[in-house]
Image (tube, coloured by chain):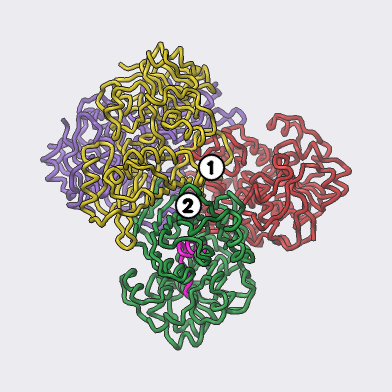
Chain colours: A red, B green, C yellow, D purple
Amino acid sequence: MIKVGIIGATGYAGGELVRILTAHKQAEIKWYGSRSYIEQQYASVYRNLFQIVDAVCMDDNMKALADEVDVIFTATPQGLCASLVNEEILSKVKIVDLSADFRIKDVSVYEKWYGIPHPSPQFIEEAVYGLCEVNRERVKGARLIANPGCYTTCSILTAYPLAKEGLIDMSTLIIDAKSGTSGAGRGAKVPNLFCEVNENMKAYGVATHRHTPEIEEQLGYASGEKVLLNFTPHLVPMNRGILVTEYAKLTREVCEEEVRTIYEKYYGREKFIRVLEKDACPETKWVEGSNYVDVNFKIDPRTGRIILMGALDNLVKGAAGQAVQNMNLLFGLEEAEGLDLVPMFP
Amino acid sequence: MIKVGIIGATGYAGGELVRILTAHKQAEIKWYGSRSYIEQQYASVYRNLFQIVDAVCMDDNMKALADEVDVIFTATPQGLCASLVNEEILSKVKIVDLSADFRIKDVSVYEKWYGIPHPSPQFIEEAVYGLCEVNRERVKGARLIANPGCYTTCSILTAYPLAKEGLIDMSTLIIDAKSGTSGAGRGAKVPNLFCEVNENMKAYGVATHRHTPEIEEQLGYASGEKVLLNFTPHLVPMNRGILVTEYAKLTREVCEEEVRTIYEKYYGREKFIRVLEKDACPETKWVEGSNYVDVNFKIDPRTGRIILMGALDNLVKGAAGQAVQNMNLLFGLEEAEGLDLVPMFP
Amino acid sequence: MIKVGIIGATGYAGGELVRILTAHKQAEIKWYGSRSYIEQQYASVYRNLFQIVDAVCMDDNMKALADEVDVIFTATPQGLCASLVNEEILSKVKIVDLSADFRIKDVSVYEKWYGIPHPSPQFIEEAVYGLCEVNRERVKGARLIANPGCYTTCSILTAYPLAKEGLIDMSTLIIDAKSGTSGAGRGAKVPNLFCEVNENMKAYGVATHRHTPEIEEQLGYASGEKVLLNFTPHLVPMNRGILVTEYAKLTREVCEEEVRTIYEKYYGREKFIRVLEKDACPETKWVEGSNYVDVNFKIDPRTGRIILMGALDNLVKGAAGQAVQNMNLLFGLEEAEGLDLVPMFP
Amino acid sequence: MIKVGIIGATGYAGGELVRILTAHKQAEIKWYGSRSYIEQQYASVYRNLFQIVDAVCMDDNMKALADEVDVIFTATPQGLCASLVNEEILSKVKIVDLSADFRIKDVSVYEKWYGIPHPSPQFIEEAVYGLCEVNRERVKGARLIANPGCYTTCSILTAYPLAKEGLIDMSTLIIDAKSGTSGAGRGAKVPNLFCEVNENMKAYGVATHRHTPEIEEQLGYASGEKVLLNFTPHLVPMNRGILVTEYAKLTREVCEEEVRTIYEKYYGREKFIRVLEKDACPETKWVEGSNYVDVNFKIDPRTGRIILMGALDNLVKGAAGQAVQNMNLLFGLEEAEGLDLVPMFP
């Protein structure tokens, strides 16, 4: 039984980790870290877990935690994991960091986009970017996993095969992303109040959103060139779900079948990536509550562009589900253990 | 492995049966009946099940089905199950009927409230009302289960212990119920369009809703007297969830502790009924996607009334989950098999 | 042109006052009071008013304000208006208080339910309860208007004619109320976040909600007896709208026609109260954005009860619209001036 | 008083025409045409208009109607207006057609995208594309107005000044549009049911949506070149509102100020187009219920692109509001008459 500690257990991603791990056959949560709710019953914060979880919240003490568990999930704001981690801790325990601290290899890029100095740049090199379908083998041997963000997982996986095969002109790539509101976290802020979000829609972080360099870096590895792209996130009145619509010029004339073959090549054996049938547009509801990413594409011969679409549940494949998938790889378990979550409709 | 057939597999309750049974370790769906989608891929109707269910929809042929499966779920409109069932079929297969056909023992009451003649009254007597927590033992030996409705499950379980113990004056009982829209089904009707339901709220079926006599009958058994009550359903802009608020005069002065003890007596060992802590009001979100019913109460010494509250997911404990719970009892399985669904929040 | 000052202009009720008064032909807002946003452009707080309102927010200085305007609206938390008002101010300016400070005549009842000492009980007596359709003549001559709450306006107007005519047994009256989330205000609190409210429903303040004594007092005047009742509010995932469902025993056998005649007697000439046609249940969407209250009823001969239903927009007839209606009466304007708001659907 | 007839009065756009015209000081609706509800009270179809509109629905008889009214609004499916209109009718009455029948000048383009033969191509030439801010003078003298679609109004107005001034490379223009569900109409279809739309998001009509050629044609006039672009609509769980996000390469290096000056040049005196302040992203809620279009932009120096954003209420500026604005121009009224609708928040 793998012993698990969670730092930041009372945010939405933390809550989703608890939901998933509670049903995981080979893992057991030993530490519910939440600085804001220390010594309160976890099930009094998330009453959906009443009579399911019987534990109180603990402090975010990573050092103490490292002695008690096999793996730590940090579902915390930027900078926290990087400020706590050290060699001694990493020698005792695996870390899956759900924040952005170790996702970007170039520390100056991190510091520019996040606006804070990186507290422990010495671990950036060894951290593995935990996009399982792309980096599966490297994840297995890692000590420190940089779990990808929700927007980035969806954006990258949707374009990855075509970037890798050189089928799209990377300098024309535009990503228009739409997200439910749980991605904004559980902080008490006026813009996230029900009455402000409901019956409303907006873009935000236009040309400046922090997930941009993460997407650029990963698609850069795939395409073998430096990538600069536009990424525009939007807030939509729903709880869960990310939908991305991507636009790029094709580098040559291709037919539907050829593109489909390329997707099959990369994703044909991937359980959690479903390439939909011709003309089916991904809907966030079809993946809700599950670890799936649904992708599809449409060629527009009029403009010579291809339109790519991807959908996932931002709290599962975009956060906690992918983190558990990484944990399964780290400990040599069945990759889908605990993640056989059938999407819920309606 | 229990072989399962579903008639009405493409309605919302049918879809939920598929979601739950797909993850059930000891059951296997052999027949996806759906008159409207015959020969179409089931996963093209519910794309959440893409790459999970690989089967085409079949006709609603109960006779053929009885030879192929061990249990039939009928998730169909009133009258259908009763018009198809016969002695030969019942001798071969168990039936869990999610419609109202066999819920009401007095056929004249059924015919008055539903406005149709009952096609097979000869089976009413033997049918067992499948409210597992109340009729567990009788369910085990049955051939034909009348699976309770969503409003009724919530309404009855919320009041049952107090009705049973004579603590509330049944002639004063009023049930004000609120439901998400999936309870209205997947039929294409203007009043169920997004724009008509969203940002809107209304009562309907006031003093005439068909679930009324079902609640009255069951609470009549509990209290040992003929019950007449007011039941008012409301439509609320959400997908899933029923919340009931019930009002009744106390028959004598009681304290919080005493009432709590009574609830404990009936529900203390029930996995799927959670009596919340003092002053916590049930929220539909805390049970979403799960088979739980959350209940609680508040005594108002000013008026001598007690206010009871209950919440469940209308598609799970209010339909498909309870149906599977009944199936588990019928076949001697662990009662919670396939129903370890952790509520999803947010 | 009537000069208007608003204290609390950046809450939801304050914002609605601005929306309505901006289109009012005989009133002009001179003071946008908002302690939290002093010296900020009002239209930067509510961007819907960009290029419509060009003014900065001011402090909540009622003394200074009294010299500049003809009427002050206080859309502020409990206790604020009562702590600022004094004889000098009232000699200069009319006050329409949207808080509860002057709604309850018995100061001990106020202090018990609101849990704060009343800062200026000497003005309670003269304050007029501004339910225009009930107290129209008394409003006209008042200096200080206690503008009714949203739940209370809906609850009282729905039952008023029957209480007045002795048709219902007041000791059996139960009010089950459902509200959109704007009633909870614009404060940044976790329970009002989008993800907590959306796809969720709950009761709150059960047997203890502060609007209870206000309803009891007013229906007490109507019926001529002391009234104790149960009032249960519920939070529903929508922005605007209150729906009440009320239950009471009839004091004698009546037919549909007779009850309809009674409603006609009281509301037949009221522009803002619409008694719907037989069997039409009020829907909050049919009154959204307008000053209407829609009411109707259903007799249940089985139980001897009558079920009453009422719907209004909590920010209009339940707050700002009624406040403007009171202002119109106070200054001898056409009562509906500025309130010809056609409900918006969908 | 201008006499108005509406054909298709019971669709959502028709209902919005009624809401707006009911409050219009110089127009009066004489004919509520609705084939589906002939002889039924209009207010029984849209109960928000109970006691406001007292009229029954009539047939869609344009010939009879032409003798009774001064202007006809056709809020009907493609092909209907074009099949009814003739020279005699146009000699008697003005027509504002809310369908697409006369929006596209090249009849072969219309027939290709709409898949039906055009019933009266002889009127295409004289029809004026009723985008008031662009074609104001030509609208004034017209007999037949092709009222722009909701997506197109938003898409065109957002890009128009930059297209006109040659600031963007039209061959790189990509329009990603998101719409509330009222745009899908009031037809009873499964994909528009509450439970299918709520908590869901999807693209549709990818590379094939019918509004594409309309946008291309109009932006072609503006830029003076043939335009081919990608337009992708998305369905979002809200009633009202369209948001467009547009991407294009700048043709030269420009600063924020310069672009702002260009927007000011075209829209500075336009009442219904609000160019927001720097860094404010348009939100659909800020224009809800009103005739405003809010636009803004962001330059991304990293990629050399500009991101344009626009928001409007699809039923007002995107349909009925713009139609009334056209009517006002046609009859020499104040352009904003009846359209002083303050956006409603929340």
Residue C212 shown left or right of residue A267 in the figure = left
Question: Can you say which quadrant of the picture contains the N terminus of chain A?
Answer: bottom right
Horizontal relation, residue A337 to residue B246: left or right:
right
* Residue D15 included in the magenta stretch of the image: no
Identify the residue position indicated by label 1 in the image.
C194
Q: Nearer the viewer, residue B76 or A282?
A: B76
Disc 2: which residue: B304
- Which span is picked out in magenta? B146-157
Identify the amino acid type marked 1: Phe
Residue A242 on image: x %, y %? 57, 47
Give the prevailing secondary structure in the magenta stretch: helix
Does residue B342 show up?
yes
Q: Residue at x 39, y 46 (%)?
A: C243
Real-space CA distance between mark 2 and mark 1, rounded to the nearest whole angstrom: 36 Å
Disc tally is 2
Left or right of residue B102, residue C1 in this image: left
Mark 1, secondary structure of its residue = helix
Residue C133, relative to residue D161: is it above or below? below
Answer few, some or many: residues within 10 Å of disc 1's Cα (few below 14, many 20 plus, some between 14 and 19): many
Q: Is residue B156 magenta?
A: yes
Of all chains, the one bearing label 2 is B
- Chain of the residue displaying label 1: C
Mark 2, mark 1: which one is toward the viewer? 2
**Residue B110: x and y, percent?**
36, 73
Label number found at residue D343: none
Question: Quadrant of the rendered structure where residue C192 is?
Answer: top right
Name the residue: 42% across, 85% down.
B86
Q: Position of residue C210 (x, y in %)?
A: 48, 38
Determine if marks 2 and 1 fall on one subunit.
no
Q: Badge 2 local density, few (<14 within 10 Å), some, or many (20+)? A: some
